[in-house]
Structure formats: structure tokens, C-alpha cells
Image (cartoon, rainbow, N blue to C red):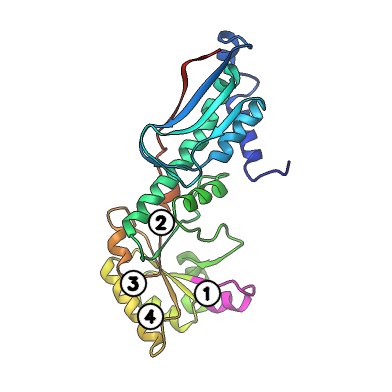
């Protein structure tokens, strides 16, 4: 089997939790007992993480049957069944916590992302994630953002150029940083720069920035930034993409999205998403 991006991650998670063995289960549960179990959403959520959930069970015991009932990206109401399990009671008990950790965390990311997307509404700017991810879980968390309806910003430092405030300070200013980045940028890789004032925005526009991140500007500041960019590009259409970031919450994202920016980004999608409420229970008379 070709290794997926989460196989080794699951192996490490099981080594952390299961280690040399599940002492409680080994002492309490006879090896020959089998069960049927169900994973249910206890509150409304958006599913993500069924792949690693299934992989945990596979690595613990290949004989455990796992039937996924809700696809990644699908919404669940409270009490909806997400998966059914059948097999060794001991194996399911030993895998339960690790499997649910993946499913709950990633479904939490997808659920929060969907809430932001719904708050923006149809026809609004794209919702972007950031690199503020849990170490080791970036690919899975960014996948969960997509399941929630968001879009991925650059995945890592090697696949996108974003000149941040400390780059600007160390390089000697907006213009100097832009000149160096544009001179050496790989073909097809756009140059984005972060600004927090209209003066810096004007410099970025004059320096040929293709994307400008407007950092911690209030809605009035964002509207003025959009107007400045449109004026700079007149009489043609605005060619520079504008991204609003900083201070983005579920309470503020709608107003921010109505300022005319092309994208809204927030690290909260991955660094502040609460775990989704899911539970695994044996069926009544499910022990056989």
C-alpha cells in the first residue's frame, strides 16, 4: 500500500498512547469478545478526519470492520451516526481515544471553517487559512479547512513568498524587500507583502507587489486601502489582490468581507478550533 501523508503520523500517535499495550483492556476484556459500536455526533458539526480515524483502527487490528457513514465535508446533525464498527472489543477500546482525537480535532477545524464561510456569505471574498497550525498536523488541518469550505494559503515557507514586517525591517524597507523578492522569485510564484499603513500600501503598489496583505486594519482602513489600490490601477481594473488579516473573528468577518478585499485570512481556523463533540458507544446488546 502506498503510504498516505498521515500513516506515519498515526503510527506515532499510537506509539504515544498505546505504547507496549493497553493494560486496563488486557486485564479486563477477554480476547474472544467482539462488539458492534457507533460513532455519533453529539452536536452539529462538519466531518473531517475519517481517513486517519480508519487508519488508527487498521493499524491496531486489520480485522476490525469500519463503515464510514458520513464523508469528509458533510454536515451532521446532533445524534447522526458518522461510523459503525464491528470487531474485537479489546482492539476497539485500545484504538478509541487515538481515533477520536483525530476525528474530533479535524472535524472541529472543518466546523469552525464552515461557520466563517457561512458568516461571509455567498459571493464574498475567499477565506484563507495560515501557517498557524499544530506541528506535524499541517497537512491534515489544511485538508480540514478545505472540507469546511475554506481555501489554503501557502502550505509552507518553500511554496510561497510573503514578505512580513520583520522581513521589511531587516531588508531596509518595503521597496528594498520587494525588489529583492521579485528579482529572485521562481517563475510563476507571486510576491505578496504585508503592510499596515496606507503609506506602506502605496510603496507596495509602486514596487510591483502582486498581492498585498492588509494587516490589522479596521473596516474603514480596509475600504480606503481598496480605494487606493483601485485608484493606482485606474483607468483599468485593479490588478493587485488584497488580503485582510488580523482581528478576524466570527463577529467581525462579515463587515471585513464587505470592504472590497479579495481574501480574508485567519489563523483561528486551525489554532483556535474547539474539538467537535463526537462519541463512540457500543450498541445495546452489541457484545457477542
Q: Do the residues labelled 2 and 4 touch (CB within 8 Å)?
A: no
Q: Mark 4 points at which residue?
A: 229
Q: Please rate how many residues cluster around mark 3, counting C-alpha atoms within 10 Å: few if below 14, some from 14 to 19, many from 20.
A: some
Q: Earlier in the sequence, mark 1 or mark 2?
A: 1
What residue sits 55% from the left and 9% below the top? 28
Q: Mark 2 points at which residue?
A: 266
Judge the density around disc 4: few (<14), some (14-19), many (≥20) Cα neighbours within 10 Å.
Answer: many
Q: Which quadrant of the structure image shows residue 256? A: bottom left
Q: What element carries label 1?
A: helix
Magenta stretch: residue 244 in it? Answer: no
User: Tag 4 or tag 2, which sits nearer the N-term?
Assistant: 4
Q: What is the secondary structure assignment of the residue under circle 2? A: loop
30 lies above or below 73: above
The reply to whether discs 4 and 1 touch (Cβ–Cβ < 8 Å) is no
Q: Name the mark on residue 177.
A: 1
Front-lying residue, 241 or 66: 66
Q: In which quarter of the image is residue 185?
A: bottom right
What's the distance in space between the residues labelled 1 and 2, CA to CA?
Answer: 24 Å
Q: Is mark 3 on a helix, strand or loop?
A: loop
Q: Which residues make up the magenta segment?
A: 177-192
Q: Which residue is drawn at 55% across and 46% down?
A: 140
User: Residue at label 3?
Assistant: 260
Which residue is at a point 35% across and 50% down the rendered structure image? 115
Amino acid at each position: 500500500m502506498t503510504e498516505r501523508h498521515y500513516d506515519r503520523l498515526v503510527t506515532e500517535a499510537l506509539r504515544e498512547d498505546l505504547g507496549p499495550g493497553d493494560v486496563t483492556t488486557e486485564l479486563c476484556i477477554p480476547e474472544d469478545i467482539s462488539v458492534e459500536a457507533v460513532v455519533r455526533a453529539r452536536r452539529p458539526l462538519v466531518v473531517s478526519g475519517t481517513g486517519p480515524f480508519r487508519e488508527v483502527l487498521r493499524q491496531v487490528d486489520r480485522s476490525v470492520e469500519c463503515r464510514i457513514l458520513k464523508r469528509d465535508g458533510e454536515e451532521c446533525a446532533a445524534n447522526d451516526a458518522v461510523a459503525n464498527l464491528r470487531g474485537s472489543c479489546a482492539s476497539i477500546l485500545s484504538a478509541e481515544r487515538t481515533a477520536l482525537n483525530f476525528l474530533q480535532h479535524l472535524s472541529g477545524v472543518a466546523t469552525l471553517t464552515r461557520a466563517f464561510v457561512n458568516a461571509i456569505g455567498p459571493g464574498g471574498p475567499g477565506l484563507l487559512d495560515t501557517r498557524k497550525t499544530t506541528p506535524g498536523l499541517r497537512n491534515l488541518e489544511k485538508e480540514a479547512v478545505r472540507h469546511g469550505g475554506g481555501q489554503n494559503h501557502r502550505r509552507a515557507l518553500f511554496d510561497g513568498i510573503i514578505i512580513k514586517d520583520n522581513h521589511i525591517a531587516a531588508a531596509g524597507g518595503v521597496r528594498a524587500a520587494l525588489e529583492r523578492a521579485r528579482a529572485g522569485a521562481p517563475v510563476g510564484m507571486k510576491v505578496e507583502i504585508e503592510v499596515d499603513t496606507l503609506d506602506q500600501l502605496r510603496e507596495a503598489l509602486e514596487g510591483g507587489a502582486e498581492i498585498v496583505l492588509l494587516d490589522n486594519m479596521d473596516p474603514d482602513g480596509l475600504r480606503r486601502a481598496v480605494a487606493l489600490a483601485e485608484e493606482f490601477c485606474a483607468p483599468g481594473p485593479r490588478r493587485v489582490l488584497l488580503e485582510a488579516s488580523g482581528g478576524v473573528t466570527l463577529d467581525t468577518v462579515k463587515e471585513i468581507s464587505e470592504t472590497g478585499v479579495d481574501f480574508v485570512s485567519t489563523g483561528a481556523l486551525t489554532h483556535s478550533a474547539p474539538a467537535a463533540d463526537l462519541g463512540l458507544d457500543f450498541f445495546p446488546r452489541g457484545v457477542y
